[in-house]
Amino acid sequence: MISFWIVAGIFSVAVILAVLWPLWRAPRNNEASLIVLNRRVFQERMTELEADHDEGRIDTDTFRDLKTDLQRNLLTLDIDAPALHETRSWRLPLVLAIVTTAGSLLFYSTVLRSPEVSQWWQVQQSVGPAAQRLMEGKPPSDGENKHSLQEIIQGMQYQLQQNPEQPEGWFTLGVAYVQAEMLAPAMTAFERAWRLKPEETRYALTFAQARIFSNQGQLDDLSRSLLSSIVQREPAHEGALLLLGLGAWRSEEYALAVPVLEQLIQVRQQREPNDTSVAMQEVAKALADARTRLQAGPVTRSARLTVTVQVDKGVSERFAPDDVVYIFARALKGPPMPLAVVKRKASELPITVELDDATSMLPDQPLSSVQEIVIEARISRHGSPEKRTGDIEAVAVPVRQGADSQKVALRLNSVIP
């Protein structure tokens, strides 16, 4: 803080001198130049008058009158010049110096006394070293464990502002964002780490995982490319095989899902021949479903529920265009986990989507397997599907599914307290 005041003082003095010095010096020089010019003009005019008088072009009385007028004018200009110097050389610079100094002190004191800036300075002083150690992959010391997650994030942000070329720092910041359930900035941090060091498997894998999660578990072009590159370099990388295989299955890319999931099961059996974990059971179910659908040919989607979501004018200013809209169906009687989910941006409202078996979360529990369901919609201010304070939701609509497609209308109008 002391160093800041020193630097601020130096810059303030420099600005004051830069503004006032020309004002202070210019009038004095202008005054001297003006007096010299006036006297030079007087001498030239006197020479002309004397020449006219000597050559008889004007008489003696006219010559005396004109000479007297010239002398009077010169005397008047010489008397006025000191007053001009006094007014322009001292008063204006003095007033500007006082106003500039007072304004600078008021600005700096106001800014530095604000709670946000004070907290920022305190965080940098206390959390900066701990944040830097974490970004370098070093464990924190005993005295550095007292900081909150938000303070650690602020410390990392400051360190990366000073030195942004730290791929491990960006990766660690992304992990901290995930822990704080700040998914959008986490995606940005993971992408920055990957771009700084694209050959690092951890960065590419985590960035791909974040993209898949934000895309309802489905692959996009970049996540598919990242995971395929990892599998090509490391054919036995279980994490990349799992993400690529399940992502391809959820994206209905069964020709890709089948060989990848088969490779995953083979790698896993070589490591643990009798693995009967829940995760591997889900992988086996996804593989079986992908094989069946691949043999059956192209999937034909039949819309079962057409859901239209609108937003009430009373809450139209309570969310941002980048907030996330979740539209999902869950069983009326049963576990709260959704049967089918569609994710959109709030900027797309009003939205019309289709919920069917293709949007189901699990292959062994498609949407059509439950007769009585509830359709819900919610704007998530934090990007997370979990309900939180400040989110905007619609009144849930119960639906009894039948053979025919149905239409459901939802209106987002309630802010969660």
Image (cartoon, helix red, strand yellow):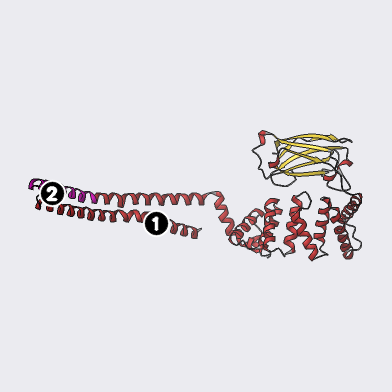
Any magenta on residue 306? no
Q: Mark 2 points at which residue?
A: 67
Q: Confirm or deny contact between disc 1 and disc 2 (CB under 8 A).
A: no
Say if 408 sits above or below 188 in the image. Answer: above
Q: Is residue 249 left or right of residue 48?
A: right
Crowd tier of the residue under label 2, counting other residues whose Cα lies within 10 Å: few below 14, some 14–19, many 20 or above: some
Q: Nearer the viewer, residue 116 or 304?
A: 304
| Residue sitting farthest toward the left | 60
Q: What residue type is labelled 2?
A: Lys
Q: Quadrant of the C terminus?
A: top right
Q: Is mark 2 on a helix, strand or loop?
A: helix
* Coordinates of residue 11 in the picture (x, y in percent): 44, 58
Q: Kindly indicate the quadrant of the structure image that contains residue 226.
A: bottom right
Q: What element carries label 1?
A: helix
Say if 70 sits above or below 204 in the image. Answer: above
Q: How far apart are the two marked residues, 1 and 2, measured between alpha carbons?
A: 45 Å
* Coordinates of residue 81 in the picture (x, y in percent): 24, 51
* Coordinates of residue 201 in the picture (x, y in percent): 75, 63
What is the magenta segment's predominant secondary structure?
helix
Crowd tier of the residue under label 1, counting other residues whose Cα lies within 10 Å: few below 14, some 14–19, many 20 or above: few
Q: Earlier in the sequence, mark 1 or mark 2?
A: 1
* Coordinates of residue 146 in the picture (x, y in percent): 65, 57
Foreground mark, 1 or 2, reads 2
At x 51%, y 50%, the residue is 111
Q: Which of 191 and 176 is in front in this view?
A: 191
Q: Can residue 90 be seen in this view?
A: yes
Span colored in magenta: 55-81
Q: What residue type is labelled 1?
A: Ala
Q: Is residue 298 left or right of residue 131?
A: right
Q: Name the residue under label 1.
A: 18
Which mark, residue 360? Answer: none
